[in-house]
Image (cartoon, helix red, strand yellow):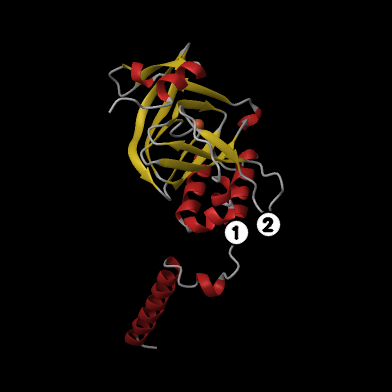
Amino acid sequence: MNRREFSKKLMAAVVSYALFDSLFASNAFSKSVEPISKHWALKLNEYCSDLRKNSITPLEWQNQIEGLYNNIELSEILKFIDFELLIKGFEFPDFGVNTRRIKFPKLEGLPERTVFVKKIFGMKKDRAIIPHGHSNMSSAHLIVKGEMHLRHYEKIRQEENNLIIKPTVDKMINLGESSSISDEKDNVHWFIANSDSAFTFDVIMLDLNNKHYDIHNLDIYEKQDLSDGTLRVPILDIETALKKYGKETHH
Ligand SMILES: [Fe+2]
């Protein structure tokens, strides 16, 4: 083979490799090569089991679950959790939210008792999942109805009855979008319904690292700016917090 033939052959190989690579990247084979892709609920359970065993980090768990939600049709999730039945006769409280436990239908490979808690949270317009931080917990939240104002803060440290936090997210999120928290990332969250009603589908992992989970309700309106990008906010008891943050009244 002369040099010219050789480089021609090499080019052909490179081109076919590039084509092959791009076909894979665009998932062109997914239908034919992988006809029985794992059900999303099985993947969800796998990620949660991995987190329970500490074989993945909370941050990896957050990325996996949100990646999963990005790649499934919302309608599939709504059908699987039987969302229509869950919200039938749903009672919306005047302050804060109401929840309902979800029962998954039977699915081969899915244990009857999943390692995660699964619930829907529902609220009327201007009602909130009040601002709070968590310890030894991870959770993921998919908007399954409506629109919400979402804020997240990083938990920097605790000082007696205050939490030092740093704002990370402040945006509207819509149907099909998700968010998540852990001790590693975006620990504090706060949702306010911006549509007539709003619902989230929550996957919650409690008592991570074999320690009891904890929740701190925060008085974010009383924030003290520490001038280094962080805020000092008081921790509130649940009754006071719900009264102050459960329903937005300023318009
Ligand atoms: Fe939470």
Query: Can residue 72 be seen in the rendering of this structure?
Result: no
Residue 176 in the image: x percent, y percent? 43, 50
Q: Nearer the viewer, residue 171 or 180?
A: 171
Residue 199 in the image: x percent, y percent? 47, 42
Which residue corresponds to mark 2?
107
Query: Can residue 149 be seen in the rendering of this structure?
Result: yes
Q: How many discs mark residues in the rendered view?
A: 2
Q: Is residue 241 left or right of residue 213?
A: left
Distance between mark 1 and mark 2 Cα atoms: 9 Å
Lower position in the chain sequence, tag 1 or tag 2: 1
**Residue 48, labelled with which disc?**
none
Task: Give the quadrant of the C terminus.
Answer: top left
Q: Is residue 85 left or right of residue 162?
A: right
Decide if ligand 1 comes within 8 Å of the CB at mark 1. Answer: no
Residue 56 in the image: x percent, y percent? 57, 42
Q: Quick one: SS at disc 1?
A: loop
> Are the residues tagged 1 and 2 within 8 Å (C-beta)?
yes
Question: Please, what is the three-letter code of the amino acid marked with disc 1?
Answer: His
Q: Please, which residue is most extreme toward the front here?
A: 89
Q: Is residue 201 above or below residue 75?
A: above
At 41% across and 29% down in the image, what residue appears? 154
Q: Residues within 10 Å of mark 1 (few under 14, many from 20)?
A: few
Question: Please, what is the three-letter code of the amino acid marked with disc 2?
Answer: Leu
At 40% across and 70% down in the image, what residue appears? 22
Which residue corresponds to mark 1?
39
Q: Nearer the viewer, residue 142 or 90?
A: 90
Q: Is residue 66 above or below residue 162?
A: below
Q: Residues within 10 Å of mark 2 (few under 14, many from 20)?
A: few
Q: Quick one: SS at disc 2?
A: loop
Q: Nearer the viewer, residue 9 or 107?
A: 107
Task: Give the quadrant of the N terminus.
Answer: bottom left
